[in-house]
Image (spheres, coloured by chain):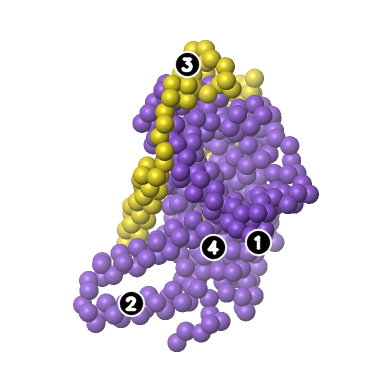
Chain colours: A yellow, B purple
């Protein structure tokens, strides 16, 4: 039997569990909204402007670096599974692969992309 | 025949066999039988998760209290305030649901579901005992990492949709932190996978029958895993996303009631998953003394890691943002590459 069917069943049940909780809360909770209560919370101060603003470029650079390294980490997983049976040739290939990866990291480092201002 | 000394896994296996025989005699199709079996396991798992969350919240309070020479909850329910977390759950259920007028209403509503459901799914591939594993997938560990990384998305959704400066900052910091520490986390388990040659959880536990990977060169991987795991679940000293002294409560500032509860619960379920994976990959999973049921030794190891994470909270001060990112990218990431190389050489030499 396909094991992914079990994953699917569990996703459906987890969604049902979450929904059941939210529906129960919806049925039993109070609701007395007021203008002051629904204001954006800023420690009692009147909020100046919205929060949907431009933010630091750094976050974007780190997200980009993450995508590069995460994809490479995904490549390493199948390699790790077959490593034992392939032996020395797999190690040499890893050295080449990690070398390229580390060169990229060093480049980003030198470029100052890892610097948080 | 079933004996009292046998573990829960054997009991479950025995029940499955009985059920299969019953289905065979009644002529029920295989698909229906499989779905009923997995459905029953899922129900049991959901009950277990709810109880685990309650126990862990109570434990967090008591451990924190005793480390600060206080008692913690003492009144609710009588004996040492044991029902305090149950009372808190009821309170969260009854609380009013406040959505700020300026918020993006639908994203604000969906964010807690997006964080809670994936944090439940990770439990499916955790091997509690010999037969007690929801789905022994051949990509087991990848499923856990895949689903647990969705949490970043949800935290950012919650932080952005609230339209509040604190939540935005908390969400952004959290996203940056979690993606930075996900790399060392994923790379640190590669050493174990190389030693075993499989991504399947049961294979990894079986490989540790004689010696835990903790006592091999994989120790370095374990240390990297614990540090990165602490950052991944936003626990102190890496709890910048919800640094209460500067950001009120971080990304969940504008949440109340059960929606806040889901954020909090998923933090505890994720902590459990991180600890359970540590117990499986480095501490031998259900392997233990023969007189102890497998599930007991598994849970004991998992709660040992949970306790360690709680201990961290009262030992280390919070890091600064720039130091946090430096530590992740300039120290842990190169170290985990070194770990892979070291394990590769070790595996070859051993062969």
Name, please, the residue furthest toward the bottom: B1
User: Could you give the CA–CA distance between mark 4 and mark 1, rounded to whole angstroms?
Assistant: 40 Å
Circle 3/circle 4 CB separation < 8 Å: no
Badge 3, how many Cα within 10 Å: few under 14, some, many 20+? few
Q: Are marks 1 and 3 in contact (CB under 8 Å)?
A: no
Q: Residues within 10 Å of mark 1 (few under 14, many from 20)?
A: few
Give the spatial CA distance, label 3 vs label 4: 50 Å
Residue under label 2, please give it. Answer: B19
Distance (Cα) linking label 3 and label 2: 59 Å
The reply to whether callout 4 and callout 1 are in contact (CB within 8 Å) is no
Horizontal side of residue B41 vs B248, given as left or right:
left
Who is closer to the viewer here, A10 or B259?
B259
Q: Are marks 3 and 4 on the same chain?
A: no
Q: Position of residue B294 (x, y in %)?
A: 56, 71
| Residue B210 in view (yes/no) | yes
Residue at x-position 36% and y-position 44%: A27
1 and 3 marks on the same chain: no
> Would residue B332 be seen by someone viewing this image from the given angle?
no
**Residue B79 circle label:** 1
Tell which subunit mark 2 falls on.
B
Label 3: state its secondary structure: loop
Residue where numbered disc 4 is placed? B204
């Amino acid at each position: 039997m396909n094991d992914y069917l079990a994953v699917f069943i569990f996703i459906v049940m987890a969604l049902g569990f979450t929904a059941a909780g939210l529906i129960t809360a919806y049925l039993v909770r109070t609701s007395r909204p007021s203008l002051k209560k629904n204001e954006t919370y800023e420690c009692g101060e009147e909020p100046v402007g919205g929060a949907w603003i431009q933010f630091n470029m750094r976050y974007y650079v780190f997200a980009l670096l993450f995508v590069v390294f995460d994809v490479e980490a995904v490549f390493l997983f199948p390699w790790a599974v077959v490593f034992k049976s392939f032996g020395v040739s797999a190690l040499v290939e890893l050295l080449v692969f990690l070398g390229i990866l580390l060169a990229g990291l060093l480049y980003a480092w030198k470029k100052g992309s890892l610097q948080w201002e | 025949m079933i004996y009292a000394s046998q573990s829960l896994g054997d009991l479950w296996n025995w029940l499955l066999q009985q059920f299969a025989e019953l289905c065979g005699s009644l002529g029920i199709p295989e698909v229906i039988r499989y779905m009923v079996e997995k459905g029953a396991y899922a129900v049991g798992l959901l009950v277990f998760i709810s109880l685990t969350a309650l126990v862990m919240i109570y434990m967090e309070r008591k451990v924190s209290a005793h480390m600060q020479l206080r008692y913690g909850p003492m009144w609710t329910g009588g004996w040492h305030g044991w029902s305090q977390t149950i009372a808190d759950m009821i309170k969260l259920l009854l609380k009013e649901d406040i959505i700020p007028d300026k918020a993006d209403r639908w994203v604000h509503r969906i964010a807690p579901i997006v964080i809670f459901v994936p944090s439940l799914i990770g439990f499916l591939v955790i091997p509690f005992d010999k037969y007690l594993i929801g789905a022994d997938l051949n990509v087991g560990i990848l499923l856990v990492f895949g689903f647990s990384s969705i949490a970043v998305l949800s935290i950012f959704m919650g932080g952005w949709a609230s339209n509040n400066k604190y939540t935005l900052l908390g969400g952004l910091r959290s996203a940056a932190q979690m993606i930075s520490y996900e790399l060392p986390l994923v790379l640190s388990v590669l050493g174990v996978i190389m030693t075993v040659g499989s991504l399947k959880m049961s294979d990894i536990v079986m490989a540790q029958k004689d010696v835990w990977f903790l006592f091999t060169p994989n120790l370095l991987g374990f240390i990297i895993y614990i540090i990165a795991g602490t950052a991944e679940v936003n626990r102190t000293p890496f709890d910048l996303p919800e640094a209460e002294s500067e950001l009120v409560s971080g990304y969940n500032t504008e949440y109340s009631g059960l929606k806040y509860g889901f954020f909090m619960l998923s933090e505890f379920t994720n902590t459990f998953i991180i600890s359970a994976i540590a117990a499986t990959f480095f501490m031998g999973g259900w392997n233990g003394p023969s007189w102890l049921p497998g599930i007991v030794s598994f849970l004991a190891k998992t709660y040992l890691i949970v306790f360690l994470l709680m201990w961290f909270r009262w030992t280390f001060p919070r890091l600064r943002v720039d130091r946090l990112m430096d530590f992740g990218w300039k120290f842990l990431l190169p170290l985990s590459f070194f770990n892979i190389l070291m394990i590769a050489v070790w595996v070859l030499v051993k062969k």
